[in-house]
Amino acid sequence: MPDPVIRIDNLHIDARANDAWSAIVRGVSLAVHPGEVLGLVGESGAGKSTIGLAALGYLRPGARVSGGSVHLLGQDLLALPESERRRFRGTQVAYVAQSAQAAFNPVHRLMDQIVAVAVDRGGLTRAEAEERAVTLFTALRLPDPAQFGDRYPHQVSGGQLQRAMVAMALICNPALIVFDEPTTALDVTTQVEVLISIRKVIQDFGVAAIYITHDLAVVAQIAHRVAVLRHGAVVEEAPIARIMDAPQHPYTRSLWAVHELPVDAAGAHDRKGAPLLDIRDLAARYKQFQVLTDISLQVGRGETVALVGESGSGKSTLGRVIVGLKEPAAGTLTYDGQPLAPTVARRPLPTIRRIQIIYQSADTALNPRHSVRRILGRPLTLYHGLRGARREARVQELLRLVEMEPTHADRLPGQLSGGQKQRVAIARALAAEPELIICDEITSALDKVVQAEVLRMLLVLQARLGVSFLFITHDIEVVRAVADRVVVMQAGRIVEQGEKARVFAPPHEPYTETLLASVPEMAVGWLDRIIAGRAA
Amino acid sequence: MDATARPVSTPRLTRFLHLLRSAPLTAQFGMVVTLAYALVALFAPLIAPYGEVEVVSRVPFDGWSAEHLLGTDQLGRDFLSRLIYGARNSISIALITTILSLTLGCLLGMFAALVGGLVDQVLSRIVDALMSVPELIFILMILSILGGSILNLILIIAVLTSTRFYRISRAAALNVASLDFVEAARARGEGSLWIAVNEILPNILPLILSELGMRFCFIFLNIAALSFLGVGIQPPTAEWGSMVRDNAALINMGNVTPLIPAAAIALLAIAVNFVVDWMLNRASGLSEEA
């Protein structure tokens, strides 16, 4: 067997928090051989990114190595001074970050940024580097490869930008690339394209890779071997086939169980009487842009309707129209038999109370300067006139309802984890005692383990309180788990709607077909079948 | 406000004391000096050896002596006593003016940011117009029209300074107003004023407090300058700016006494700015935990 490209031995990394050092990586040993792809899997906070960066000999500010070594091509990176290590980065080992949007400088052309390392320390001339970049653009199947580099980051799509970053990583023909969740921020339909490109260049250029992700279905398509991380230590490492078929460690098995979200066994909720929310022929526009056209849908009492579609399909705008934040250009909204005023300012408070919205990012949806008590207390005072001890009692009750501790009431949002913040946001919506809750991508910012917990909790709450949900999401797995009915949107129109079982069973509308086919399956070889299917 | 807020207050006090101790030396110096000024202003009648307008000597421009530590002024009043009373007048007027302009500017700024559209445009253009005229000349002009009473002085300076608060709070509020929690508050059915005070203000407060310190210094200097020019606070009220002017003749004779009120103004300005710099540093870093 040839020498490994990178060998990490018994690596320990500490991070500084509140004036104390705590271990975030505890004795990790890994090796990646030429041409091999190692998947690094674990929930957020498991230390995946820290290890990925350590492979570049880089530590985030506030972190330190407390033991172990990192050998890149036989060279001990950690023994070198920082200035020496810099020479390796971009040339021998490269990094592809999660958000290309954030990684590219918006004021420079793509080509200037992609060739910078090659010209600076890769030993290529500008002309050679640009030639190679165009070759890579072609290999990555980017449109119009010769001119692609002349564009600015905002002039290309998210999927293209992510592939441009892969080109930047490959420009010096490195021995190792670290992919840090490169498709997490993308839509499922875009994700497939990027995955296919990544797979292709890894094979074509024979580069070794570390692929970091929390999505097991993705890692199954890319990696040869998988290391499962938990609390900064490797709990299991095995070839991909064995990890998929016969996971050994209990934690690995629990990751699998989570991925197969509980499909609502009770079956569709019966729709009784008139629908709670009835939307007819709705249209909306921003300035001259038509974002919603001919939208008609109903949400029944105690029912969960899932609104699916990729970003830009207008599903979030529809949510904003329903709560009255965006005035519709045409059409009618009827709630419980009564017409709804177009804007929230013209709706009476008791009507506002009955429809609540929960946002995608609890980070921005909760005021960072308000304690949890104040956040939950406000709707109680506003809608129900509760004060003092009675309000406090209800705050505690709400915290219990979303499975949090009474002591959390004193915390600020910054002192809570991502999952806890989303629970607070859910509790704030529940405080109003609404009949309809609009959930706008509420689980997409959470990792799979937390996501499953939050969804399970919502289903329990629905059974107890009888609320209706309008679930806006692009995650088909979530839809499978929670929805009674499904509405598929594309480019501001509804392309298909109906019972979950009917929408998900063939024959499909063409767009629904694409959407369903893009969801990675939990099986090795899914991507191969897609590639083979396209070639045929 | 909250019944449960009380048990939290004790650690809050210790945390505050801890915070003061952790402040850099410049900020501690600034706080001590500012506190000293405040005490002098507050207890002026107890500290001053003579009355504010009391003529205590037949000799105008008397030199420093055991009886009159800093000598006497052009009318034979005790210079030190007038300096002490001057602290009271100058500081209190500057403080009232600052608070007025802060309230006016911030409320309008947040209002403009939240409502947007035509209201924002009209308010912003009015503010631009006010800011485009040199401040001191503008004040002189309006004072000569309306007459130089203390009330007029306070109102004019407050309105002109509020343009600065307007701009900074509008810009900061625009950033905050685009966040989901503001939209969530709208969706909840809250009014604009409630959102401004409860959702936005806590998030832009550090920035505004820093601006507050800066503006306090400028207002203080403005009043002193106006008094020096003879249109600010009228005699016989003791005020630092007019004290410099009234006794300026002494400088020709090599006497530094008229410069002491000027130094008092400068020292306060420096002290307040030290404190403000420190607050700004804290606000730009991690402001919650520290």
Image (spheres, rainbow, N blue to C red):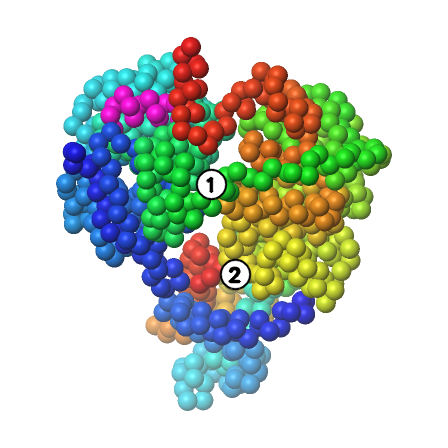
In the shown orientation, is residue A189 left or right of residue A204?
right
Which chain hosts label 1? Answer: A
Give how far across and how far down residue B87 sits, in percent.
52, 73
Q: Which mark is residue A256?
A: 1
Disc 1 element: helix
Disc 2 crowd rating (10 Å Cα; few below 14, some 14-19, many 20+) is many
Give how far across and how far down residue A262 sits, in percent.
58, 40
Residue A324 forms part of the magenta stretch: no
Disc 1 crowd rating (10 Å Cα; few below 14, some 14-19, many 20+) is some
In the shown orientation, is residue A407 left or right of residue A106?
right
In the shown orientation, is residue A60 left or right of residue A289?
left
Query: Residue at coordinates 24% horizontally, 37% vertically from top-left?
Result: A32
Image height check: is A396 above or below A528?
below
Whole-angstrom CA distance, mark 1 to mark 2, is 62 Å
Q: Say which amino acid is labelled 2.
A: Phe
Query: Residue at coordinates 55% horizontally, 44% vertically from top-left?
Result: A452
- Tell me where the magenta segment starts and ends, as one range: A194-207
Q: Which mark is residue B216?
A: 2
